[in-house]
Image (cartoon, rainbow, N blue to C red):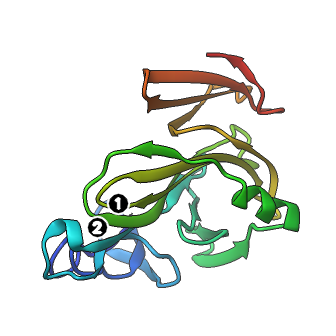
Amino acid sequence: VYGQPAGTDPGISKPGPVRVLLLEAATLKTAWEQALGDITSGEWCQENCTASHEQRTFVEWDPAVVRSGDRQKLYIVHADEEMLTTVDFGARTVRSTETKTSQSWLEHLLAWTAGVAQAKGNSTGAFKTAALSPDGTRLYLLVQKISASAEQANETADLQVIELNVGQTLMSKQVGQASGIQLAQDGNLLLLDGWDQSGHWVQVLDTRSLEVVAD
C-alpha cells in the first residue's frame, strides 16, 4: 500500500508524509511500514490562506509511482527534484538516487517552452507519470510543470528515459502539453496524449529514439 494522510484541512493544510505498508493478505496485519519523509507530495495552500481563492498561493506536487512487474518493488520519481526512490518490499529497504546527470540536461530544462491556459488562483508544482518497460530496466517518465496565476497558467511537458539500474537519464524530449503516457505491450512504442487549442491529440513514439512515428 502507498499513500499519505490528507491533512487536517484537505487542499489547504499540508498533508502528512507519504508511507508504504506491507500487509498480510489474509489478515491485513501490518508486516512492514515505512515513512518516506523525503518525498514531497500533495496539494496545499502556502500563502494568503485566509484570503479569497484568487489571492491564495498553492503548491501541487504529484510524484510518479510505478510498480515493478513482479510487484516486489515500487519506483517513485520525486515531483519536486530529480530523484528516484526505490522501495523493495522483498528486502524491506528504501533507496534514493539522483537522476540529474549533466550540465547539458540542466540547460535543456531551462530551454523548455511554455503553453498558456486559463487558471484560477496562484499555483506552482509538477505532475509526473511513468510507464515501466516490459523487462523492468527503463522508466519512461512524463514530467508536467505548472506555474499559474489568476490570469494564466504556464505549462511545460518533457519526456525522459531513465535507466533504473544506475538512475541515469538516457534521453529526453520536449512533448508540448502532453498529459498522458502509455507503453505498448511489446515495449517498442510509446503513446502520448494531451490537449491544446485544437482539441485532443495522440502521438506514437519509437521507444528507442523517441521519434514520432504516428499522430
Residue 176 location, x and y as percent? 59, 37
> The residue under label 1 is which amino acid type?
Ala
* Residue pictured at 53% horizontal, 65% vertical: 79
Q: Secondary structure at mark 2?
A: loop
The quadrant the C terminus occupies is top right
> The residue under label 2 is which amino acid type?
Leu
Residue at which label 1 appears = 25
* Residue pictured at 53% horizontal, 83% vertical: 38
* Residue pictured at 68% horizontal, 42% vertical: 174
* Residue pictured at 42% horizontal, 80% vertical: 33
Q: Is residue 168 visible?
A: no
Residue 1 location, x and y as percent? 38, 64
Q: Mark on residue 50?
A: none
Residue 190 location, x and y as percent? 65, 29
Task: Locate residue 134 relative to residue 6 in the image: left or right.
Answer: right
Q: Mark on residue 28?
A: 2
Residue 136 location, x and y as percent? 71, 47
Q: Secondary structure at mark 1?
A: loop
Q: Are marks 2 and 1 in contact (CB under 8 Å)?
A: yes
